[in-house]
Amino acid sequence: MSAIDPGRFSPPPGFSRTAERLEAAGFEAWAVGGAIRDAYVRQIGRPADLPDPVEPEPNWEDLTTDARPDDVMRLFPRTVPVGLSHGTVKVLDGDDGYEVTTFRRDVETDGRHARVAFADSIGEDLGRRDFTANAIAWRPASGEVRDEWGGAEDMEDGILRAVGDPDARFREDYLRILRGFRFAGRFEWAVEARTDEAMREAVGGLSGLSAERVREELLKVMADPKPSAALDLYAACGALGHWYPELRGLAADGDAWRSALGAVDAAPAQAANVRVASLLVSASDTPEGRAEAAESLLSRLKCSNADRRCVTRLARLYLPFVGAMDSAAEHRRWLASVGDAWQDLFALHFAVARAAGETRAERYLEATRERVREERDGDPPLDLASLALKGDDLLALGMSPGPLVRMLLEELLEQVIEDPGRNEHESLLEEARRQIEIGSLAEASRPLDAPAAGNGLPGSDD
């Protein structure tokens, strides 16, 4: 008999209503998978030698049933057919949604896709699942718990074990390797020996997975309290070479890898891009090298353009950094160069310092951040949009449209960043006239037979 106590489960009302309606219509309704796993982790707690418990809030959103998709859509007034080929219908209850999936069994698999057929019993459905911890079901109507694969005992013992034949489980879907790393890392479970062997033997199959599925697994790892545990398993089992070659050299250097993993853990859990960037800042000694590694990795994973630009920018701008002893003008110049990435860059540097245990560096970073924040809160002019002089003003002075207009505006902006008090229209207009005059004199003093040189001053033709 399972040690799981369903009396301690607390699914939301919408989940319960969905299960009750299925049961009232003569069908079985079972909670299954991650919600049961996470609820039992909370129930059993953690060993005394693990003082920082990982107790994820159960996500009660999956039900499995013997009802067919047509039955589900007929029973509920608001549904979305999110995966009919796999028997899944989302039932909407207010603002919430619950995925109701018909019992299934695999008919044919190729390592990344499965052709399934509907099954008639919860036992068949549980037998096709990946790990014993995920192969537990609870029927709210009767309180019955089905755990024929021993998932509760494995969780109590801190073991990750594949359901049935491990080789077959990973051949069915190679993503289960990465999922296994995530579960073992999140809960600090030891991978059972035969399961571990099968994962290592199957790791070559990762190459055939879609970028989107691999990316989503990485994002789930990055959302965990301690991503380093799963990422270390990636490295130990040879998974980095298939999707993360930019990190392979880093992982080969034990000290550098430990530092990088420590920075990932120390970065804010809600800031996935900062955590990814913290892995990449040690991938190269140059801004260009770091940016290239970030662009390559995130493009391979088909990340969004916004995420790719964000991480690449953080990797490139990581160094050189600004310091508390720098002048206010240097702080403004740095803010102008990094734009809205400044807070993420501080988060990145704090993560690296915390990972290294450098408390003095953290204090210095805190002092630097306060000075930079004070400067930023003063709303200084940091870009051309905030300059009191515009391109039309330069055209009115007789400049021709072209790149020299922008060059002169950027020169004026540099002067304003140095001294924000100079950001006045008339003052900048006078400085613009002076610059144009200097440029004209330089052009007028050129010998008639000398070629025109691009001197970067207004009045030049380049």
Image (cartoon, rainbow, N blue to C red):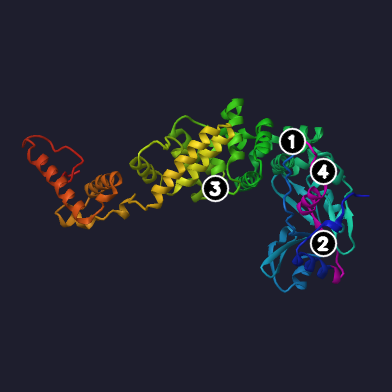
Toward which corner of the image does residue 240 lie, by quadrant? top right
Residue 35 position in % (x across, y down): 77, 54
| Alpha carbon separation for disc pair 1 and 4 | 19 Å
Residue 283 position in % (x across, y down): 52, 32
Question: At numbered mark 1, what does the secondary structure look like: helix, strand or loop?
Answer: helix
Residue 9 part of the magenta-drawn span: no
Q: Amino acid at mark 2?
A: Thr
Q: On the image, numbered disc 2 is attached to which residue?
A: 65
Q: On the image, numbered disc 3 is attached to which residue?
A: 303
Q: Residues within 10 Å of mark 4 (few under 14, many from 20)?
A: some
- The circle on residue 155 is 4
The residue nearer to you, when weighing 210 against 445, is 445
Toward which corner of the image does residue 397 lie, by quadrant? bottom left
Q: Residues within 10 Å of mark 2 (few under 14, many from 20)?
A: many
Residues drawn in magenta: 23-49
Q: Amino acid at mark 3?
A: Cys
Q: On the image, numbered disc 1 is attached to which residue?
A: 199
